[in-house]
Amino acid sequence: MVLQFPFSYLCTVIKYIKKRNFGNIHYGDVVVTSGENDNYMRDIPIGTITKITPIDYDSSLEIELVAELELLWESLELFSELLVSI
């Protein structure tokens, strides 16, 4: 089954990323869930980094992401296949 979305992306901002991580974060990196606290499964793609903004008055960064709906949909399909096989 193929689903087509009317929009290929959505934007969101992640705040309070520590500046010490600045060297490890790059434009085009795909952000995924960590799986910590069992809130979400590990490695679900959230989006691709399109902007990194250091906050001058704070020790943090803001990261703008473009949601990759196709990657998210593929992950959900894999998850549903795992549930069916259990």
Image (tube, helix red, strand yellow):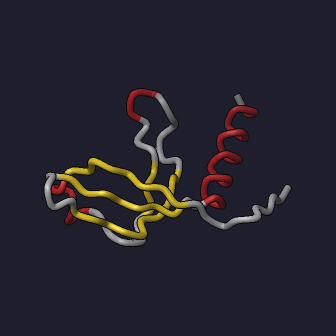
The residue at 70%/32% (across/down) is 83
User: Residue 39 location in percent, x, y?
Assistant: 48, 30
Quarter location, residue 68:
bottom right
Identify the residue at horizontal 51%, vertical 35% (top origin): 40
Q: How many marks?
A: 0
Nearer to me, 73 or 56:
56
User: Which image quarter is the C terminus in?
Assistant: top right
Front residue of this view, candidates 58 and 72: 58
Q: Is residue 59 left or right of residue 62?
A: left
Q: Residue furthest right?
A: 1
Which residue occupies 66% across, 45% down? 76
The image quadrant where one finds the N terminus is bottom right
Report which quarter residue 26 is drawn in: bottom left
Q: Position of residue 63 (x, y in %)?
A: 35, 59
Q: Residue at x 81, y 58 (%)?
A: 3
Q: Is 1 on the left-hand or right-hand side of 82? A: right
Location of residue 20 in the rendering, given as x and y in whole percent from the top left corner: 15, 56
Q: Which percent across, then down, holds residue 44?
A: 53, 47
- Left or right: residue 7 versus residue 43 is right
Looking at this view, is 43 or 12 the one in front? 12
